[in-house]
Amino acid sequence: MTTVNGYEIRPGADLVGADLNEADLNEADLGEADLSWAHLNWANLSGANLRGANLNWANLGGANLVGADLSGADLSGANLSRANLIEANLIGANLDGANLSGADLSGADLTRARRT
């Protein structure tokens, strides 16, 4: 377990509304964590495990999510503008209402991802 900005970074963590702007969360294990309404602008989440995480309405503008595992994650309403999602795993992710303007999804796996 790691602590960043006073928040415990671990699987299943309750990080609702957490201020993690510009945090270095490279390869962090946040599987099944609740990051709804969290502030992750320009955060480094490359290679992070966010499998099944709740990221609804999270602000991930400009975040580095290269190679991150977001399979089954709830990203509904999330701001992913300018986010780097190269080679990210978004299998079965919920992207309903997500802002993807300027996001780089090169090589991302969007199999069964939902967006309306």
Image (cartoon, rainbow, N blue to C red):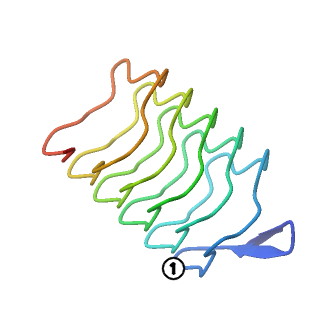
Question: In the figure, 5 relative to 103: above or below?
Answer: below
Left or right, residue 1 beside residue 95: right
Q: Type of residue at label 1?
A: Gly
Q: Which residue is mark 1?
A: 12
For image coordinates 71% across by 43% down, the residue present is 43
User: Dot 1: what SS?
Assistant: loop
Percent x, y of residue 97? 33, 48
Residue 21: x %, y % from top left = 77, 50
> How many discs mark residues in the rendered view?
1
User: Which sits in the foreground, 72 or 116?
Assistant: 116
Q: Would residue 77 appear left or right of 42 to someone viewing this image?
A: left
Q: Tell me the quarter of the image containing the N terminus.
A: bottom right
The quarter of the picture where residue 17 lies is: bottom right
Residue 7, percent from left and from top? 77, 74
- Percent position (x, y) of residue 14? 59, 81
Task: Look at 59% across and 45% down and name the residue there.
Answer: 60
Mark 1 neighbour density, 10 Å: few (under 14) some (14–19) many (20 or more): some
Q: Is residue 112 above or below residue 107?
A: below
Q: Quadrant of the C terminus?
A: top left
Residue drawn at point x = 86 percent, y = 74 percent = 6
Q: Which of the 4 quarters of the picture holds residue 88?
A: top left
Say which quarter of the image contains residue 94: bottom left
* Left or right relative to 49: residue 40: right
69 lies left or right of 111? right
Residue reaching furthest to the left: 112
